[in-house]
Image: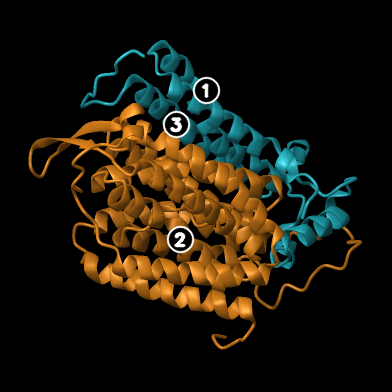
Chain colours: A cyan, B orange
Amino acid sequence: MTEIKIQKSATPEQLLYADILEKGMFFGLALIIVTFILYLTGIMSPAVPLDQIAGYWELPVKEYLAAINTNFLHLAHPPTGWVWMTLLGKGDFLNFLPIAILGGVTIVCYVAIIPGLFKRGDKAYAIMAIAEVLILTLAASGVLSAGGH
Amino acid sequence: MKDLFRRTGVAGLLLGCFTALIPALALANEAAGTAAEAAFMPMPAAGDTAWWVWPLLLFVVTFVMGIIAVLGGVGGGVLFVPIIGGFFPFHLDFVRGTGLLVALAGSLAAGPGLLKANLASLRLALPVALIASTMAIAGAMVGLALPTNVVQILLGATILGIVVIMYTAKKSDFPDVPKADNLSTALRITGIYHEPSSRKDINWQIHRTIPGLATFILIGFMAGMFGLGAGWANVPVLNLMMGAPLKISVATSKFLLAITDTSAAWIYLNKGCVIPMIVVPSLVGIMLGSFIGVRLLKVAKPSMIRWMVIGILLFAGLKAMDKGLGTGLMG
């Protein structure tokens, strides 16, 4: 295994991770501002009208999804998993996009540092990074959330 | 770093202004007669309060929460879930989903700067994150499968436990680690950082790696189950159990949340536990509050704020228990 010197400054992988995290965070936050404005101003009409939303946020998630589906969306199944991608034309569901970006940026950071870790002979950490990518991708895939509760 | 805060602050401020405009926009919508389509399922009663009052109140409360969180040295998530879950009409499913996103956003905002300054250690974070994020997924799935009143009771008990930890736990700036253990040596979890107060470079290493990592099984599970974030537990374990210096522990913990909470947040997102009208005002409120909090940090008395946070958490924990048990003793 190649020896890694302990250094005062951050490692190249750490700096790369930080750079991608920073860009992803700014992009996600900027986008959430835009999408929320589009939603709030009614420029993009929401699936659930603003003046009716308070009737739904008190419900458990399963009942909430069933109710908004019956009353507004009329989909074959309540909108779980990545179904929101098909509803991006609605102001409220459009806000899921920046939220997903904020949730996805960490996966991108991990993917980016894997080649450098292998290159520096840091196999243990490269394998850990691959495992983390798999775990986060599994969580993001929606496979674990299928079937409701 | 300063520039980062300034740029994020400006963006947040813009959105804050729009959030504050919610009532005006709501009235405009109603005046325009934008009635909803005919409903097929009876719409649940929403009480007498106008819908926009809650997001606006949420923005104000999370703004104050952001200030208190910084001054009290706790994460936003640990205050958000018990307080919003206890005193707002939103169902706990949405509060937990939002709590994770609040903690995630705070971590994403701070993480890059902490990594660049070499205060957050990627080598320390990676093994911990792998365990915590896996268990956070399990915690989120269990939490969403349990009846709400059971989660409320467990949440109340957890918050009261956090109060005890905050009250009793000591912190050590530079814990004594005479010898790094075999695992941390093999993984080369060690580093150097510059301590401005003593103008010295501090060499650090850790010990008790296996029990420390094992503790993150529980921490990750609880973070996912309750949507609390996990800084309240990360820091004592990294600092007192594993022996990382306090600054490294706090910074690495803050960065860790971006990974742990990401995995759990995806479960909540995929289950549909995200309502943008709850999420966005909360994110903006707590981030703006945090920026103000950082500025107030210079003049505030940390010990007084710390006692205030303990008091708030004690009240919120009891309220969660009361809600879960349905006793109604606290209104």
Query: Disc 1 vs disc 3: which is toward the camera?
Result: 1
Residue drawn at 62 percent across, 80 percent down: B325
Image position of B42 with respect to B22: above or below: below
- Mark 3 residue element: helix
Q: In this rendering, do the residues under marks 1 and 3 share a single chain?
A: yes
Number of other residues with Cα within 10 Å of mark 3, as a class: few under 14, some 14 to 19, many 20 or more: many
In front here: A116 or B8? A116
Q: Amino acid at mark 2?
A: Val
- Name the residue tied to disc 2: B78
Q: CA distance from mark 2 to mark 1?
A: 30 Å
Q: Quadrant of the C terminus of chain A?
A: bottom right
Q: Is residue A104 left or right of residue B123?
A: right
Number of other residues with Cα within 10 Å of mark 1, as a class: few under 14, some 14 to 19, many 20 or more: some
At which x and y percent is residue B234? 39, 51
Q: Is residue B212 left or right of residue B152?
A: left
Q: Is residue B276 left or right of residue B202?
A: right
At which x and y percent is residue A29? 50, 40
- Mark number displayed over residue B84: none
Q: Quadrant of the N terminus of chain A?
A: top left
Residue B10 in view (yes/no): no
In front here: A28 or A18? A18
- Mark 2 residue element: helix
Name the subunit of mark 1: A
- Name the residue tied to disc 3: A21
**Mark 1 vs 3, N-terminal side:** 3
Residue drawn at 73 percent across, 38 percent down: A143
At which x and y percent is residue B213? 42, 44
- Mark number displayed over residue A111: 1
